[in-house]
Image (cartoon, coloured by chain):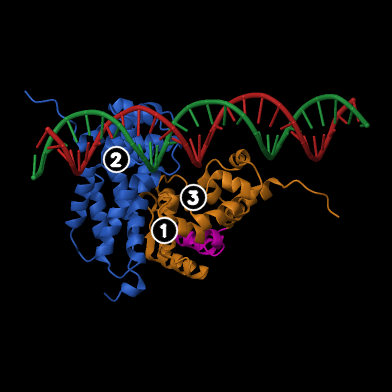
Chain colours: A orange, B blue, C green, D red
Amino acid sequence: MTQARHPTRLETWRALREATLRLVAEHGFAAVSVDDVAAAAGTSRRTFFNYFPTKAAALFDPDPELAQRLERLTAEAPDTGDVWADLRGICAVFVRWGPHDALRVYRRVAGSGELGDYPVEVHRHVQAALEAWATRRLPGDELGPRLLAAAAGAALGAAFRTWDPASPAEEFARLADEALARVRVGPGRATEDT
Amino acid sequence: MTQARHPTRLETWRALREATLRLVAEHGFAAVSVDDVAAAAGTSRRTFFNYFPTKAAALFDPDPELAQRLERLTAEAPDTGDVWADLRGICAVFVRWGPHDALRVYRRVAGSGELGDYPVEVHRHVQAALEAWATRRLPGDELGPRLLAAAAGAALGAAFRTWDPASPAEEFARLADEALARVRVGPGRATEDT
DNA sequence: CTAGGGCCTTGCACTCAGTGCAAGCGATCC
DNA sequence: GGATCGCTTGCACTGAGTGCAAGGCCCTAG
């Protein structure tokens, strides 16, 4: 039989994330203390802070594996020449992975108004990855990459806020597609000679 | 001669905002405590929290007068039939008012990475006002108003982050114009029969 | 087998943000 | 003159977040 084994770093991370998600879904963000989460995950309060810098981070920080997949997705994305269309393609794929259980909790927390800053928190790392991708695609353009990533983030955010968390996850993806389709981001004057 | 007079509520508000802005500009957000701010504004710590729910709020909450002007701006905005164009018009005006001294501090704070959530904080109330306006313009459309406001906010945010706070404020307005011009938000399928 | 070094956990103590409560103070209204 | 209302303030408390140092587990070198 297998020896009692120390949990790996990722396992502890996931236990904390899991506990946070569950407790917050049950009681709301404010009503859950870090001590509660740590106890529920079978670690100490101090260890919690070794993994997450803030309580909110335990809710929103990207799962390392998911982050890696996103990294790969942007790295392998096609270049059709139309940056915005390619970006939409990336988003369309990404939006169908998401940890939808987490998304539902995010929506609940968002609706309760407990976290004024939730909308970005949720998408910050996604938007950062998109911006990095756009920067590779538009070297020399300062505004463009930020604008592209922000516009995509805005579309995803609007879809997210419109989504009814009680409805199937596919509905969120559909809303995101629609939102992305309604937005268009064109090249700047400086780069239209490309 | 005038009698010694109790400061009006707005005056106290402004004293606290002013003190926060100045101290944060000097020492950074984290290095300034609420006690410091309260003392600098000539009030008590407890009074600070009677005016602002959080330390960040003292930095970012909209000046009541400015909020009113924004309210009026959206109320009186023209309706040319092209929602996005009208929205761009509103933003173009707004972007030339801003308390640019505050904006410069925001950029500094933003650059230092102390406030992960700054970008929204800065624009939250603006975006909310734009969304309210868009909702009046597009009744019955759930996604549309959020998308319009978020897209405009994204453009403003991208311009803001690209702006060099050492350059004149007009440069920020120019960047905002450019960003807004590069983005286009179209009507949804459901509303294209309007 | 043992000694040591690295990584992770944990407890302790501390600062600071944010809140409820109740007392105080000035102005206003009968 | 007394009741009331709004604002301020002090006090005490919870909980987030951090630095520090001690202890435990594992792996490796001798």
Residue B15, percent from left and from top? 25, 31
Q: Are marks 3 and 1 on the same chain?
A: yes
Kind of residue sitting beneath label 1? Gly
* Residue B169 on image: x %, y %: 27, 38
Give the left or right position of residue A151, taking residue B126 as reference: right
Residue A83 forms part of the magenta stretch: yes
Pointer 1 residue: A111
* Lateral position of residue A64 relative to residue A144, left or right: right
Categorize mark 2 by other alpha carbons within 10 Å: few (<14), some (14-19), many (20+).
Answer: some
Vertical comparison of A44 with A147: above or below: above
Crowding at label 1, few (<14), some or many (≥20) Cα neighbours within 10 Å? Answer: few
Relative side of A172 to B175, left or right? right
The span from disc 3 to disc 1 (Cα, nearest Å) is 15 Å
Chain ID, mark 3: A
Confirm or deny contact between disc 3 and disc 1 (CB under 8 A).
no
Q: Position of residue B81 (x, y in %)?
A: 22, 66
* Residue designated by label 3: A31
Q: Which residues are magenta?
A: A77-103
Q: In this view, which residue lies farthest toward the left?
A: B1
Q: Quadrant of the N terminus of chain B?
A: top left
User: In this view of the protein, can residue B164 be seen by the observer?
Assistant: no
Q: Is residue B36 visible?
A: yes
Residue in the image at 46% along x and 59% along y: A108
Q: Which residue is mark 2?
A: B171
Q: Nearer the viewer, residue A140 or A130?
A: A130
Q: Earlier in the sequence, mark 3 or mark 1?
A: 3
